[in-house]
């Protein structure tokens, strides 16, 4: 459920990619731990995630072309971008370059871009892989020339399945560990907390308000 | 050509509450003003602080007097204006002016400060395109140009593009929502939230097409197009309501009053009181929406206290809704957060409240649930879940502040739940600080046959007699309960029971079943129990008569544990031990070790105690062949010769004879030991004993023993003539070595003493050799006065004082130096 939140986020993560590649399913798998078929996203959707002491805002955008203008706006100040494509669709991979990379101009200078192939599970059935690992990996390196990727634990490319739940959490933790790394003590605490309960914004909001006066 | 007549009309609208509670509006026209202009009014805005009205007509912004509607002609006028916006939240507001942002046809914004009669130009901001709509908050201006939205900080001049928007195809709308946050009409009929930082903090809302206007009244966004008024909540961005409304053209929030206009009419939109909204959401069981709304109601019209009361009641209602839907996790949270009276919950479970509890559900009712039977509709599993829920809930709040005042209700409820399922928690619940009363718990426990728990409950309520009666029935097998801990438990209970009348009442049943266990009631009394007449040892011993083993255990307790020094007990115990031995001796086929154990017990008391009547025992023992016991008894009578003869002649136990000497001389003068060994030696050497040859070896062994002690001269005198020296050689050598050793030791001691003596003499001489000159100038080191007579004191360090000034001869009175006490 989406609800009011006026809490300032410490990190903004944006998910971009062509319509129907599975962006919303991907976020829901991470936040709720389930796979449900979703309506196409309208405009954008928003989720808050607690990571140690940090508040992380995850923005899921709509892939439909008519929202391209808005996606640019939603990219503003993003510290990380997930560039999603459907592994069984060449065009969805190509539009990352053509449509979505330019949108990230408004993101933060050191924005990390993680390329994520979706629907890995389909490759097990009759569908064929349209994009090779090498291609995607190469692409993921090229677009991250703004940051020093040699410090990353691996190339910013993942192949995932929201249906099966494979590799989903890994993508987010890869990003969080890069952007807002936790100390050991924070990690221990983080183990206990899960998702922020957005249905209770009032108390926190009130606190924040007090702070700024 | 169309002819337009421009009027500004002044109405007074009064809101009244009709007798039925409905809000009705009464309006009255106060006046009007004809403006000699050819275009319709594009925008009209009141600046109440200045008593002015801002009018935009025919691209000209002018001021009118708010009351008589006369134009202010003093040059307060801006031309070429497409739209304007009042800054309702200026960053540096002055009460005597208002701030206005104006969009010009020529790609420019202007910022003005308006006073009663003037518009003061503050700033120009250039744009790349002409502006078509404006919103202002603080230092920020949100602008819709022909092709996009952007955010401008008019103080710094900083400008940020937001997103593209085609103002040709749909109307750009900008509404301030909260501090530095605007809601904009975006592409694809999206309502976009934008902050002054140029980002979004809420997901967009989905509007319908062709909006004419939008307004905001917390927490709702109200939008009109020509068919509907739609209402979205800012809390979850979802549409909450759509009201059909033809030809809507304008909507506005005027100091909290919503007005909406069609081409012909003006309506007021009266919000349903938030409490009612919440109530109706609850009625639809939309619990989380209802509570979200209540939380975000900004306590409209209520004090903080009042609000939290109202909110708590909503939580309570919500709790019961979740409860009735078996959403137990949510229900539990809400019961706690809403501080629901636990009796409200208990009262849903038939017969779980204590019968003396005259609780009635609060009015107005929080819910319409009759009881959990109604909710579970006979489904056993659901029923079980409900009972399980209650159990967990009660366990959770037990002992917390939510339970204050309801301990009895909670504990009785738990007791009943536990009893039903025979929970292992039942006994701890009763045993530790329980709030369970006897009244209906007794019936309940009987009904579910939790007899042991029942007895414990009696016990907790100090009804020990009843408790014991239940346990007795359990012992006797009249009733059964697997939790009953058996005879041991009851024995222990009696052992700790201070009511001795009850001890006597029930101990018999235990003794009959198990005498050894029963006697523990007497032997394991609490250490701090004061002595009582009813439990006097004599009384107990008399009583235990029927249980001989028990008597022995009890006497052992008195003699060995309590160490009572009473001849009676000691003799009694010795006699009983003896009887037991005699009994065993009489019987055939008695295992040897049994007899050995019995005799060693007897010997132990005979040896250890000095209190029993020796003659009495001896009289009996003498008639048997219990020589070892006999020897001990003679020993007690100091008849050592007799005792040792028995040990040597009858038992031929020479080791025991030697031990006898040691034991009987223990703690006594060393001469006693020597005497005893001499007696033993003389027994060995007794010439009248016919088998004396057989005792030569033990005699030699005794003489050579490390433990024995003798007077050597006496020994040599008593040795028979015919013994060879070699027989005695070891003894003699040892004796010679011993006396040699002591002779040398003494000599060394003597020489050392002499040396010490010499040393002391030398010291003394040296000290006396020093002289002290005494003359008239010599003063006492202490009092600094002259010496009057001939005696004085001199310390080893040369300090000289009066005799009376020398308080301590070991401490120099001047320097405090210590002198060894030995030397002087
Ligand atoms: N087999 C499979 N199907 C998936 C997976 N993820 C998403 N889908 C399906 O792909 C379709 C699109 O999923 P969405 O998550 O709505 O896609 P989206 O990227 O959010 O689409 P837009 O919101 O329109 O941009 C749905 O039918 C999903 O069921 C996956 O991992 N495996
Ligand atoms: Mg989506």
Image (cartoon, grey):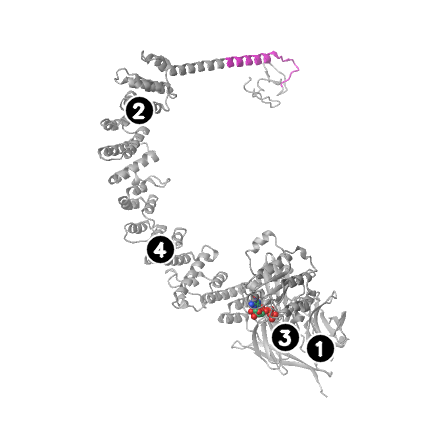
**Disc 4 residue crowd, few under 14, some 14–19, many 20+, Cα 10 Å:** some
- Where does residue B78 sit, x and y in percent of width and height? 76, 75
Which residue is labeled 1 in the image?
B55
Tell me which numbered mark, 4 or 3, is placed earlier along the sequence. 3
What residue is drawn where x is 64% and y is 81%?
Answer: B29
Residues tagged 4 and 3 counted as in contact (Cβ below 8 A): no
Q: Nearer the viewer, residue B59 or A55?
A: A55
Residues tagged 2 and 3 counted as in contact (Cβ below 8 A): no
Residue B807: give its label: none
Check the image and report above or below for B723 versus A108.
above
Q: Nearer the viewer, residue B457 or A31?
A: A31
Tell me which numbered mark, 1 or 2, is placed earlier along the sequence. 1
- Where does residue A110 sit, x and y in percent of width and height? 69, 60
Secondary structure under badge 3?
helix
Residue under disc 2 on the same chain as residue under disc 3:
yes
Which residue is labeled 3 in the image?
B189
Q: Marks 2 and 4, Cα distance to the nearest angstrom?
A: 70 Å
Letter of the chain that mark 4 sits on in the rendering: B
Q: Marks 1 and 2, Cα distance to the nearest angstrom?
A: 136 Å
Magenta highlight range: B751-780
Q: Is residue B756 left or right of residue B631?
A: right
In the rendered image, which quarter contains the N terminus of chain B?
Answer: bottom right
When asked about the image quadrant of residue B31, the answer is: bottom right
């Amino acid at each position: 459920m989406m609800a009011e939140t006026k809490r300032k986020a410490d990190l903004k993560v944006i998910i971009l990619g062509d319509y129907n590649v599975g962006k919303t399913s991907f976020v829901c798998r991470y936040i709720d731990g389930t796979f449900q078929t979703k309506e196409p996203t309208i405009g954008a959707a928003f989720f808050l995630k607690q990571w140690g002491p940090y508040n992380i805002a995850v923005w899921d955008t709509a892939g439909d072309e008519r929202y391209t203008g808005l996606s640019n706006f939603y990219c503003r100040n993003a510290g990380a971008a997930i560039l999603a494509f459907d592994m069984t669709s060449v065009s969805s991979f190509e539009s990352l370059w053509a449509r979505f990379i330019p949108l990230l101009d408004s993101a933060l200078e050191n924005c990390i871009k993680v390329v994520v192939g979706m629907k890995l599970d389909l490759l097990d059935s009759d569908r064929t892989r349209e994009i090779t690992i090498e291609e995607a990996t190469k692409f993921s390196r090229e677009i991250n020339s703004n940051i020093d990727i040699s410090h990353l634990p691996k190339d910013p490319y993942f192949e995932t399945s929201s249906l099966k739940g494979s590799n989903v959490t890994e993508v987010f933790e890869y990003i969080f560990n890069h952007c807002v790394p936790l100390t050991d003590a924070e990690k221990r605490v983080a183990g206990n907390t899960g998702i922020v309960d957005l249905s209770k914004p009032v108390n926190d909001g009130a606190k924040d308000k007090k702070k700024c006066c | 050509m169309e002819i337009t007549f421009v009027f500004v009309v002044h109405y007074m609208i009064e809101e009244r509450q009709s007798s039925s509670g409905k809000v009705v509006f009464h309006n009255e026209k106060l006046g009007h003003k004809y403006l000699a202009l050819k275009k319709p009014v594009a925008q009209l805005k009141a600046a109440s602080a200045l008593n002015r009205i801002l009018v935009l007509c025919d691209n000209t912004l002018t001021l009118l007097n708010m009351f008589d509607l006369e134009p202010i002609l003093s040059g307060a006028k801006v031309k070429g204006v497409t739209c304007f916006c009042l800054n309702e939240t200026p960053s540096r507001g002055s009460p005597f002016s208002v701030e206005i942002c104006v969009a010009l046809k020529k790609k420019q914004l202007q910022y003005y400060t308006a006073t009663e009669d003037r518009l003061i130009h503050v700033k120009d901001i250039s744009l790349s395109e002409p502006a078509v709509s404006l919103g202002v908050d603080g230092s920020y201006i949100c602008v819709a140009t022909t092709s996009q939205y952007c955010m401008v900080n008019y103080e710094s001049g900083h400008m940020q593009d937001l997103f593209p928007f085609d103002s040709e195809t749909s109307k750009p709308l900008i509404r301030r929502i909260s501090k530095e946050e605007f809601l904009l009409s975006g592409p694809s009929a999206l309502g976009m939230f934008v902050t002054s930082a140029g980002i979004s903090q809420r997901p967009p809302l989905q509007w319908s097409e062709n909006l004419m206007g939008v307004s905001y009244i917390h927490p709702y966004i109200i939008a009109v197009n020509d068919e509907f008024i739609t209402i979205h909540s800012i809390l979850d961005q979802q549409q909450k309501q759509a009201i059909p409304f033809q030809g809507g053209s304008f909507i506005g929030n005027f100091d909290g009053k919503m007005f909406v206009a069609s081409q012909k009419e003006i309506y007021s939109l009266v919000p349903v009181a938030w409490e009612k909204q919440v109530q109706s959401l609850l009625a639809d069981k939309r619990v989380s929406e209802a509570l979200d709304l209540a939380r975000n109601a900004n306590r409209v019209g209520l004090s903080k206290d009042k609000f939290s009361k109202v909110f708590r009641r909503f939580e309570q209602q919500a709790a019961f809704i979740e409860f009735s839907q078996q959403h137990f996790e949510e229900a539990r949270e809400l019961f706690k957060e809403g501080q629901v009276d636990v009796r409200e919950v208990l009262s849903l479970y038939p017969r779980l409240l204590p019968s003396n509890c005259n609780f009635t559900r609060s009015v107005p009712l929080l819910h319409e649930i009759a009881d959990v039977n109604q909710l579970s509709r006979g489904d056993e599993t659901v029923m079980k879940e409900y009972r399980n829920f209650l159990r967990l809930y009660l366990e959770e709040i037990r002992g917390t502040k939510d339970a204050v005042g309801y301990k009895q209700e909670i504990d009785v409820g738990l007791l009943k739940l536990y009893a039903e399922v025979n929970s292992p928690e039942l006994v701890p619940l009763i045993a530790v600080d329980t709030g369970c009363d006897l009244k209906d718990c007794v019936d309940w426990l009987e009904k579910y046959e939790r007899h042991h728990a029942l007895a414990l409950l009696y016990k907790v309520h100090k009804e020990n007699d009843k408790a014991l009666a239940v346990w007795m029935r359990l012992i006797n097998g009249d009733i059964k309960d697997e939790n009953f801990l058996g005879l041991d438990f009851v024995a222990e209970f009696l052992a700790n029971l201070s009511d001795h009348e009850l001890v006597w009442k029930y101990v018999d049943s235990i003794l009959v079943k198990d005498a050894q266990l029963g006697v523990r009631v007497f032997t394991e009394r609490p250490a701090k129990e004061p002595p009582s007449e009813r439990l006097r040892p004599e009384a107990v011993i008399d009583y235990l008569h029927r249980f001989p083993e028990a008597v022995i255990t009890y006497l052992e307790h008195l003699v060995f544990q309590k160490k009572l020094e009473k001849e009676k007990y000691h003799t009694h115990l010795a006699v009983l031990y003896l009887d037991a031995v005699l009994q065993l001796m009489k019987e055939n086929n008695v295992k040897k070790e049994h007899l050995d154990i019995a005799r060693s017990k007897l010997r132990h008391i005979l040896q250890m105690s000095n209190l029993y009547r020796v003659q009495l025992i001896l009289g009996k023992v003498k008639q048997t062949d219990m020589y070892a016991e006999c020897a001990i008894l003679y020993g007690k009578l100091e008849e050592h010769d007799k005792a040792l003869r028995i040990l040597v002649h009858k038992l031929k136990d020479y080791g025991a004879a030697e031990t006898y000497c040691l034991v009987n001389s223990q703690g006594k003068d060393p001469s006693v030991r020597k005497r005893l060994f001499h007696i033993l030696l003389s027994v060995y050497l007794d010439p009248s004993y016919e088998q004396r040859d057989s005792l030569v070896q033990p005699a030699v062994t005794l003489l050579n023993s490390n433990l024995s002690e003798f007077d050597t001269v006496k020994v040599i005198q008593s040795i028979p003539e015919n013994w060879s020296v070699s027989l005695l050689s070891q003894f003699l050598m040892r004796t010679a070595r011993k006396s040699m050793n002591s002779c040398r030791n003494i000599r060394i001691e003597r020489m050392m003493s002499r040396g010490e003596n010499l040393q002391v003499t030398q010291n003394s001489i040296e000290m006396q050799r020093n002289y002290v000159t005494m003359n008239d100038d010599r003063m006492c080191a202490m009092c600094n006065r002259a010496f009057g007579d001939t005696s004085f004191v001199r310390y080893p360090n040369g300090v000289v004082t009066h005799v009376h000034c020398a308080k301590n001869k070991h401490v120099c009175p001047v320097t405090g130096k210590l002198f060894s006490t030995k030397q002087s």
